[in-house]
């Protein structure tokens, strides 16, 4: 019988400084450290999602729009991160998303859009509605979170993406 693959490769994309590493570290360790180096690497965590153990591999890419084919082909799912206080970072993921959706190979890859730094409401430059609308138009999941303040929302992001990866595999 065809055993289901129990790994999910997740690529994080987005502008510099939006909190990609903070989200990764929060997910892996439940902690927020504050300052992070620019070490690009792949991290893994085994998690139980919907009663099944799954190895979640996360590539915290430190690249913005021109991600390499290698990264894109590796990914089963993507998290596109922007900072709700930085409109430029929203434009970056919008551009990235258009590239992905228009590429023949990548057009159906599951994507979750994340507006990070929700704790900085008073500096907000991108409304929740805008994020939501982009996600709806491009058939993506959407969350606003704060890697600095809470673990739970970050957990939901990764688990939602794992669900979408599984749904996509089941359709193949
Ligand atoms: P990356 O370049 O996208 O990997 O961004 P980092 O994870 O290195 O974070 C960039 C900066 O934003 C760091 O100074 C973090 O402490 C800060 N940061 C990350 N997430 C949050 C958040 O949710 N709220 C706030 N206030 N700061 C954050």
Image (spheres, helix red, strand yellow):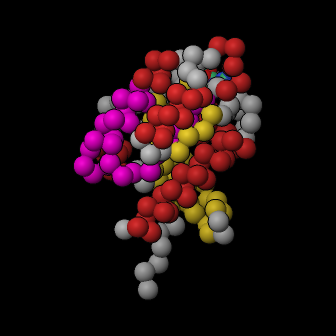
Q: Residue furthest top?
A: 123
Q: Is residue 119 left or right of residue 74?
A: right
Residue under the point 60% across and 38% down: 143
The percent coordinates of residue 39 (x first, y second) are 50, 32
Task: Give residue 49's quadrant in the image.
Answer: bottom right
Above or below for 15 versus 97: above
Q: Is residue 19 visible?
A: no
Q: Is residue 46 above or below residue 113?
A: below
- Residue 58: horizontal and vertical position, in percent? 51, 47
Quadrant observed for ligand 1 in the rendered image: top right
Comparing 131 with 85, the one in front is 131
Specify the farthest residue to the bottom: 1
Q: Tell me which residue sits at (53%, 31%) in the image.
A: 131
Q: Is residue 85 magenta?
A: no
Q: Nearer the viewer, residue 50 or 5?
A: 50
Quadrant location, the C terminus: bottom left
Using residue 123 as the reference point, say whether residue 92 is left or right of it. left
Residue 43 in sight here: yes
Nearest to the observer: residue 85 or residue 13: 85
Count of numbered tags: 0
The residue closer to the viewer here, 32 or 40, is: 32
Span highlighted in magenta in the image: 92-116
The part of the image, by quadrant, that contains residue 101 is: top left
Q: Where is residue 70? Give x, y as percent.
A: 31, 46
Which part of the image, by quadrant, shows the N terminus?
A: bottom left
Is residue 143 left or right of 1 when viewed as pictured?
right
Residue at 32 percent of width and 49 percent of height: 106
């Amino acid at each position: 019988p065809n055993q289901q693959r129990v790994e999910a490769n997740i690529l994080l994309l987005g502008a510099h400084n939006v909190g990609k590493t903070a989200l990764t570290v929060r997910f892996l360790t439940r902690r927020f450290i504050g300052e992070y180096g620019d070490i690009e690497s792949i991290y893994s965590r085994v998690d139980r999602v919907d009663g099944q153990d799954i190895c979640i591999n996360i590539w915290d890419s430190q690249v913005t729009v021109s991600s390499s084919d290698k990264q894109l082909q590796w990914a089963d799912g993507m998290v596109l991160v922007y900072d709700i206080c930085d409109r430029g970072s929203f434009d970056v993921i919008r551009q990235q998303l258009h590239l992905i959706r228009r590429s023949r190979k990548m057009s159906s890859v599951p994507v979750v859009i994340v507006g990070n730094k929700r704790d900085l409401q008073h500096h907000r430059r991108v409304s929740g509605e805008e994020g939501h609308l982009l996600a709806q138009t491009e058939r993506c999941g959407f969350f606003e979170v704060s890697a600095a303040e809470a673990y739970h929302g970050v957990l939901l992001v990764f688990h939602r993406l794992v669900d979408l990866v599984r749904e996509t595999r089941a359709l193949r």
